[in-house]
Image: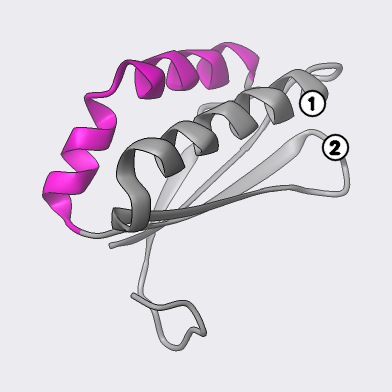
Amino acid sequence: MDLMIQYRVKEGLGDIQAEAVKGFVANIAGQFGQDIQYTAFRLPDGLSFKHLAWIKDEDTKTRLQAQPFFAEFSKGVQERAEEPPSVTPLTNVASTVAG
């Protein structure tokens, strides 16, 4: 399953969010290996973020969402975001990424 998550944080919180994202992605890499491929981008305005995730299957997504680091990161995003993040399922048409 492929997902895109987008949000914009409040003024002055871009650097804090960027650090939180780095920790979140490091936790995913450390605990899920190739079952989740995750890339996060900070857009040029410094406040908008876009995450692209490839998750092996629904069970892997459920395991991710059950992790304490996922709950902590999600709470932080909710507190810092101007609006709740939007999650969009994606259909892969073509990619150079294995999966």
From this view, report whether residue 34 is shown above or below residue 60: below
Mark 1 or 2, nearer chain start: 1
Q: Residue visible at 23% across and 44% down? A: 61
Q: Residues within 10 Å of mark 1 (few under 14, many from 20)?
A: many
Q: Residue visible at 48% across and 20% down? A: 73
Q: Is residue 55 left or right of 15 when viewed as pictured?
A: left
Give the image location of residue 96, x and y in percent. Answer: 52, 84
From this view, report whether residue 7 is shown above or below residue 92: above
Which three-letter amino acid code belongs to the residue tagged 1? Gly
Q: Could you tell me what secondary structure mostly forms the magenta stretch?
A: helix
Q: Residues within 10 Å of mark 2 (few under 14, many from 20)?
A: some
The one nearer the camera, 23 or 5, is: 23
From this view, report whether residue 18 is shown above or below residue 16: below
Picture quarter with the C terminus: bottom left
Q: Which mark is residue 14?
A: 1
Give the image location of residue 4, x and y in percent. Answer: 48, 54
Magenta part of the chain: 57-80
The one nearer the camera, 70 or 7, is: 70
Q: Which mark is residue 39?
A: none
Q: Are marks 1 and 2 in contact (CB under 8 Å)?
A: yes
Give the SS element for disc 2. loop
Which three-letter amino acid code belongs to the residue tagged 2? Gly
Q: Residue furthest left?
A: 59
Give the image location of residue 17, x and y in percent. Answer: 69, 24
Give the SS element for disc 1. helix
Tell me the colour scheme of the image: one colour
Q: Is residue 64 left or right of 87 when viewed as pictured?
A: left
Residue picked out by circle 2:
46
Q: Is residue 63 magenta?
A: yes
Q: Residue furthest bottom?
A: 94
